[in-house]
Every structure is written in C-alpha cells, then in structure tokens.
Image (tube, rainbow, N blue to C red):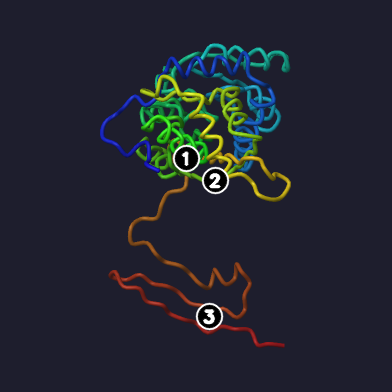
Amino acid sequence: MRSRLRCRGFKEIFDGKRRALNKAYAMTQGSDASLKTYYYELGVSSLVARLQSISGRRFRNAAFIGPCADLFYAEALRTLGLEALTVVDDVKESVDRSLARIRGQFTGAKVVGVTLEADSWPFPESYFDLIVNNLQLHWVNNVHQACTGWHKSLQPDGALIGAAMGGDTLQELRIALSLSEQEREGGISAHVSPMLTITDVGNVLNRSEYRLITTTADANTLVFDDSFSLMEFLREVGESNAVQHRRAAVSRETFLAAECIYRHLFAYREGEHTGKLPATFDVMHYIGWREHSSQQKPLKPGTRGVNLKELAELVQDDDVDLGEIIDKDGKIKVNYIKSRKPSS
C-alpha cells in the first residue's frame, strides 16, 4: 500500500461535493445504530479514555471536528470538566444534528456550531485548550495545512487528540473490487480512499510543531453478511467513495464478481461467524501538544548518565550490581560497585 503523503506537491484527492453529499445522507437518512457503531465504538470511546488517562488535567474550552459530537459531549461533560464546546464540520446537516441532540439532553449547555472545511480554520491564536478530531483526518485533502491551523489555535500546553482511519482499512474490499474490475472492466479505478499510515500522521504533527507526540494503532474487525451489507454500512456512516476521478459507473456484474471474490478469499470457514465476511478498520490514534515551558524536555545531546544505584533502589533488587555509567569525551565507562546484602 502506498502512503497518501508520499508524493510531490499537493493534490486534491477527494471530491468535496461528493463527500458533502455522502455525509449529508448519513446525517439525515443513515441508521443511528450504524453511526454509533462507527463514530462512538471506533472513535469517541477510545478518545475519551485517553483524555481521562492524562493525570490531573482538565479541559475547559474544546473544539470537536466531525459528526456525532453529542456522543463525545455526553462523556466529556461528566469526566473532563468541559465548560464550552465548538462543534465543527464541513456539512451543515452534521452540525445541526449534533447541536440538536446536545441541547436536547443537556440544559444550558455552552455549545456553538460552525460549518467549514477542516483545512480552513478561522479561529484566533490560543483560543482552545483541546481540539478533538474524530474519524475525519483521513478525509482532509491538505493534512499539513489543517494540522498547522489547529496548532495555532491551541493555547500553550493545549492538546490535539484524534482518531483516523488508515493502514489496512477495508483492504478486503479493496482487493475484491480491484480483481473483479480488472476482469470485468479491463482496468482498475479507486473505490477505497488512499490511506494515511501511522508514520504519515507522526511526521505531519512533527512538521506542524506539535510536542510530546504519541501515535498508536488499533486493528478492528467488523463482520458482515456479505459485501453489499458492508457497502450499505459505509453509505449509512458517510464513508462511501468520494475520490476524485473515480469511475462514473460500475456494472452490476462487477459488484457480483467482487462479492464472489471477497467470499472466496476472506469468508470465515469455521466458528460463530462461519460464512460471514470480515472487514478491517485500522484506527490510528494520535495526540500532540502545543509547546509550553512546563512540559518535559528532551535531554541535551551527549547526556547519557544513568545512576544504577538509584535504579536498584527503585526496583528493590538486592542482587543488582550497583554502579555508574559515565560519559566522558564521547566514551562510555562503567564503574561497578559490588554491594549486596548477605543472604539469610
């Protein structure tokens, strides 16, 4: 799989109008169960858990980028001390849906909504102390520009945290459609978005001057009766194909062939899911901070001193050979101190 970002220059990968239509359909006609499975189980729940693990930190003014902000607000209001939330998405239907559900559940909630593109970020510098991007980064055309805008609007020691699809997401569908289209249409077109890699995300955050960057990836598998059920699920959550220069029309025979290939290559042969089809959703989690004087700093080059005596006391291991590692003139010297308690 080729990384989306390994190309020269900036390219418009996604069709904005098609993407907006897909998301508008999901927000007005999609299944609530499908939306919750996708945006909450794969995204929001893990983001909230990661925020809760940040010891002693409370966030007051946050921005949430993406659909279903109500799922995040229900958790964040109770556990993060959140006082104000700005809901941001590129489709009005998505923003309206989130606002209506939040205001319907929480009296006096300080929530506002803004409709704009992710890489067009008008908020002033040092405005938010938290920006959450839930399963939206993989749809951004200019990822670096978007991350830079978010960074500028963060307060010092403010955090960007997010989840994005990437890696081997929908690899089974990609393979099945490519093989069937090659056979029936005589060529291949893009049916699944080109994916970001975890290395891409880390590199972009670093270029955008974030600090204390952490990236992780979780492999998730959802199970479907057939490939048509999978494609309907993607439609219901607004993740249908929106790649530029996609094939205008695909024949019914091509989709039937793809179903046969998918089933032949990937169907479960035994167990509780026998006969059903797996679909991979690789979720990349990332967090980066705007620089602040209170944050940990990396050691200066050449600083490699480790006191083994202190380490032994910490682990309370009486059989450790105590000593000190000394870096002098670019050479490493180890002085051992035999200090063991007599055995009883």
Q: Which mark is residue 321?
A: 3
Occupied quadrant, residue 267: top right
For badge 2, the amino acid type reads Leu
For badge 1, the amino acid type reads Ile
The reply to whether the C-beta atoms of the residues labelled 1 and 3 are less than 8 Å apart is no
Q: Alpha carbon of mark 1 to alpha carbon of mark 3: how far? A: 56 Å
Q: Secondary structure at mark 3?
A: loop
Residue in the image at 47% along x and 19% along y: 19
Residue in the image at 35% along x and 73% along y: 332
Residue 283 visible in the snapshot: no
Q: In the rendered image, which quarter contains the C terminus?
A: bottom right
**Whole-percent x, y for residue 34 in the image:** 65, 27
Dot placed on the residue nearer the N-terminal end, 1 or 3: 1
Between 156 and 215, the residue placed more toward the observer is 215
Image mark count: 3
Between 252 and 158, the residue placed more toward the observer is 252
Q: Secondary structure at mark 2?
A: helix
For badge 3, the amino acid type reads Asp
The reply to whether the C-beta atoms of the residues labelled 1 and 2 are less than 8 Å apart is yes
**Whole-percent x, y for residue 3 in the image:** 38, 40
State left or right for residue 78 relative to residue 325. Answer: right
- Mark 3 packing: few (<14 Cα in 10 Å), some, or many (20+)? some
- Mark 1 packing: few (<14 Cα in 10 Å), some, or many (20+)? some
Q: Look at the picture and state if 100 lies above or below 69.
A: above
Q: Alpha carbon of mark 3 to alpha carbon of mark 2: how far? A: 56 Å
**Circle 1 is placed at which residue position?**
175
**Whole-percent x, y for residue 91 in the image:** 51, 14
Occupied quadrant, residue 262: top right
Q: Secondary structure at mark 1?
A: helix
- Mark 2 packing: few (<14 Cα in 10 Å), some, or many (20+)? few
**Circle 2 is placed at which residue position?**
265
Between 265 and 284, the residue placed more toward the observer is 265
